[in-house]
Amino acid sequence: MSGVEIIGLGHYAPERIVPNSEIEARLGLDAGWIKRRTGIDERRYAANDQALSDLAIRAGDMAITRAGLAREDIGLLLLATSTPDHLLPPTAPLVAHRLGLGNAGGIDMAGACAGFMYALTLADSFVRSQCVTVLVIAANILSRRINEAERASSVLFADGAGAVLLAPSARQNSGVVGAHLAAQGAHYDLISIPAGGSRRPFARDLDASETLMILSDGQAVYSKAVAMMSNAAEIALRKAGVTAADVTHFIPHQANARMMGTVAHQIGVDPDRARSTVAMFGNSSAATIPLTLSMSAQEHRYAPGDIVLMTAAGAGLTGGAAVFRW
């Protein structure tokens, strides 16, 4: 077996719905301001007693249950998140334990909004080289990293989780057939949380606002993310030996509707092939692609041979794209 197939999809969005009106009232914005600029109507926030692992487990459990796979047959868990339960230890071992993955390794991957792209491409390689099943979960609780006084982050970010279960396949041409991963550290500080790491450790005199997200230049983030997502997607398509016209499902990072539309236009993907959850679930960073992949499956069923193009960019700057043949 030298191919890879997705045998299970899962997602979870917390129950609390936060409409635009709540945020617009807090920030003094006109009614409809957020929708016009982002395409978002509402988003989900985790409950006070929920941690990142709780969201990840719900999505992972759905993927495993849908696949009907014995949990001891899963060999690795990759957890893409920027908001782990703790700085130490990593959260993946706890998620693996609570999911009953007794034979699986587990590691966190902090790739910001591009975390799922990194995890998916590495998982595909591990399935091929080790002939084991890999569970990839991407999850975030960004509501606890939003600076409520800052418009840029308040209107976009949300909480959620998505999961894919990858397994060896006898179909040699299935799986990730083209990928490109990117990083532009020259723009490292465009999206940041200033304090809490080794550069600025926690201290008694640390202002709480320094542990919250800052978007220093929203327009620069937008333009550079569009360029990175479009470029990565074009390279991945070339590596796969397909064109934008061959794409059956286009699932970009759900940053905001305008960005997604611009990327689709630049790479020449038919807008009818785009799948989106941003209107109802907002931007949950790395979780948006697998969440959308899972939630779209009922309406847009995936069939063998379908070409799924995924692309993302985020803080770091990190980015990437993958062409997955179903």
Image (cartoon, rainbow, N blue to C red):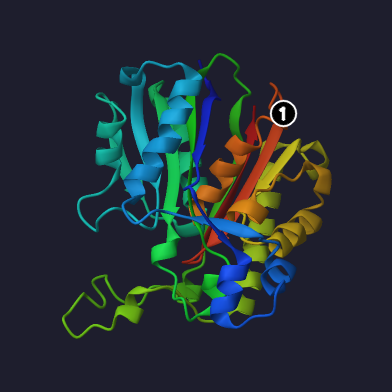
- Closer-to-camera residue (178/309): 309
- Closer-to-camera residue (164/68): 68
Question: What residue lies at 59% left-to-right and 19% top-to-bottom?
Answer: 172
Please state if 185 lies on the left or on the right of 203 as rendered. right
Q: Is residue 260 visible?
A: yes
- Closer-to-camera residue (93/247): 93
The quarter of the picture where residue 196 lies is bottom left
Question: What residue lies at 78% left-to-right and 59% top-to-bottom?
Answer: 266
Question: What residue lies at 31% left-to-right and 52% top-to-bottom?
Answer: 49
Amino acid type at circle 1 is Asp
Please state if 116 lies on the left or on the right of 75 as rendered. right
Q: Residue 254 placed where, x, y %?
A: 62, 55
Report the quarter where the C terminus lies.
Answer: top right
Q: Residue 252 placed where, x, y %?
A: 65, 50
- Image vertical order of residue 279 relative to residue 72, above or below: below
Q: How many marks?
A: 1
- Image vertical order of residue 269 relative to residue 182, above or below: above
Label 1 belongs to which residue?
Answer: 306
Question: What residue lies at 64% left-to-right and 78% top-to-bottom?
Answer: 219
Q: Residue 195 placed where, x, y %?
A: 30, 76
Q: Is residue 270 visible?
A: no
Q: Residue 251 placed where, x, y %?
A: 66, 45
- Closer-to-camera residue (174/100): 100
Please, what secondary structure does the residue beneath circle 1 have? Answer: loop
Please state if 17 lies on the left or on the right of 252 as rendered. left
- Image vertical order of residue 283 relative to residue 139, above or below: below
* Circle 1 crowding by C-alpha within 10 Å: few under 14, some 14–19, many from 20: some
The quarter of the picture where residue 141 lies is bottom left
The quarter of the picture where residue 73 lies is top left
